[in-house]
Image (cartoon, rainbow, N blue to C red):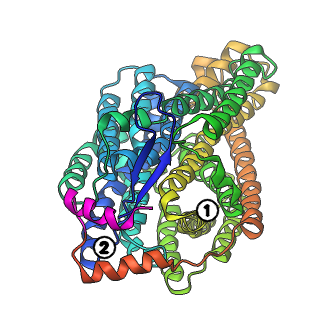
Amino acid sequence: MCLWIVPVSSTFSTESTITLTDQTNLLPFEKVIVVFCGLSLCTLVSALDSVVIATTIPTISKTLNAGSTVSWVPAAFLLTSTSFQPLYGRFSDIFGRKAALTTAIAIFMIGNLISGFSKSINQLIIARGISGAGGGGILNMCQIIISDIVSLRERGKYQGIISFVSAIGFVVGPIIGGALSERVSWNWGFWITIPISLVSVCIVVFVLPLKPVQGSIRRKLFAIDYLGTILSLIGCGLILLPLIWGGVIFPWSSPQVLGSFCGGLVVTVVFCLWEWKGAELPIVPMNMFRQLTVNGVSIASFISGFISFSSIYYIPQYSQVVVGYNSLDAAVFLIPYFVTLVVGSWIVGMIIHRTGKYKTINASGYTLWAIACGLLSTVTLKTSMAAFVIYMLLAGLGAGQTIQTGIVAIQASVPRKDMSVVTAFRSFIRLLGGALTLAIGAMIINNTLRNSMVNLNLPSSIISTVIDNPFLLLASPASVMLSKEQALSILSNGYTCGFRIVFIVNAIGAAIAAIASIYMIEDKDLSRGEEVDDSLNSEKEPASGDSTNDALQNSKSNMV
């Protein structure tokens, strides 16, 4: 085990350095399987939460009379999960992987428990913000732990376990979410993940053979980049707010919109300067951007999050509002996408294991995804179900080719000691894209819905009511002085136009990601010498567990 010595200012301690423990612990096959089974449950929790909640959003909007405010339910989760995402990388370096993952799951469970008991949309938004603070760390920590126990080249062989469990969550999740919304209650969409989370916490605490870290609790607490986290949270919030307000609550040229957006940009600049010059242990080290591949993967990951979340949240909404399906039927629309996404991801993992190459796969994945998004932008009420399913299958296959390739590419481009930080940053930038797409998607659809009512000469109060709660128009058109035919025409034209624009933007984004993959991402040697040596040692000796004596003994001969 190596110790990384990081110089810091001694503002809160007489120590002038922070000692970070190398937590790499390459395990033999039989122990890797045990660990992956535990991590798979964590992945299942995350998959179920994202898909179940996506399919219950329309029901929540109707039940709580939330209108367009309901977009803040997923946005609040993404806002906090995005902001706290990079912290988990450093948190796990300082306190250990097990402590970080356990904390993430615990916060996530508390947030979902409160979400289920929410009586108003504001309570639900706050509760989902709490869930996001923990949920953002679950998948992030699973990816970091995988990088600790399996070498880059071998990772594809074992990723099938994670992919299979993700398939269960993604395929069954929409059906569960739709069934709960229609036949039980939307509240259970949040509560259903709690029992699985409890089991996963027990496995993390008692089963995962992860290394301990050294140092006093006081020094570790002072090493956390609190200011960086606060700046990240404020910056994301200030940038998201004008995207939700613009053209709906306030005009785009209003002081509220312009002031919030400019303030967000200023805070972002301050955040970057702080991370570059001021932070003791930066959550986003600026020197990693010297690697061209890191920049390429960051661009592609941002776009990947943008496209993925818009698909998950707006396809079920379109099928309910325009096509007239209930929550359960609308959930089925996502199944083709997730099936090919998971299958494609697993196949790509095996190809990377055999060839050690990932650049071409990544670029071709984004190219296929761009084509699929272009096809989805042509969907109307006249589109056949067979055509729609084919479009979704293509989109999932393209997306599946980009998941593992992005992670492997960015991890291979940095030294092993920076792997947790760069993994956390990739998750951060991907979720940031997801957070922005929900705000931008809501803006686009709300504005196209408004435009579809311009020629009807409706009072502004009725137009605002329809935008805030389109389900009211669907259920009771007479309440807003419209006939049923007029109501259906407004929803069909408004949502179809908005849906088309969203997926045209997605297609353009995927094309940009493909170009970035071609010109900025490079194939690296995945058979690192240090990992090969550790792999050989793991076959000869028992893998290190939570023994402090083993950690201290190894550190004496490996200090750098």
Based on the picture, tell me whether residue 556 belongs to the magenta stretch: yes
Mark yes or no: residue 98 visible: yes
Q: In the picture, residue 190 is in which quadrant?
A: top left
Q: Nearer the viewer, mark 1 or mark 2?
A: 2
Quick check: 276 above or below 152?
A: above
Residue shown at 70% from the left, 46% from the top? 502
Q: Amino acid at mark 1?
A: Phe
Which residues make up the magenta segment?
544-560
Contact? badges 1 and 2 (CB < 8 Å): no
What mark, if any, has residue 355 been given in the picture?
none
Q: Secondary structure at mark 1?
A: helix
CA gap between label 1 and label 2 equals 44 Å
Work out which quarter of the rendered image holds the N terminus and state it: bottom left
- Left or right of 473? Residue 132 is left
Q: Position of residue 264 (x, y in %)?
A: 68, 27
Of helix, strand and loop, which mostly describes the magenta segment?
helix
Based on the picture, tell me whether residue 294 belongs to the magenta stretch: no
Q: Nearer the viewer, residue 548 or 251?
A: 548
Q: Position of residue 269 (x, y in %)?
A: 70, 33
In the rendered image, which residue does mark 2 sit on? 27
How many tags in the picture? 2
Residue shown at 56% from the left, 81% from the top? 356
- Left or right of 372? Residue 397 is left
In the rendered image, which residue does mark 1 sit on? 388
- How many neighbours does mark 1 have within 10 angstroms: few (below 14), some (14-19), or many (20 or more)? some
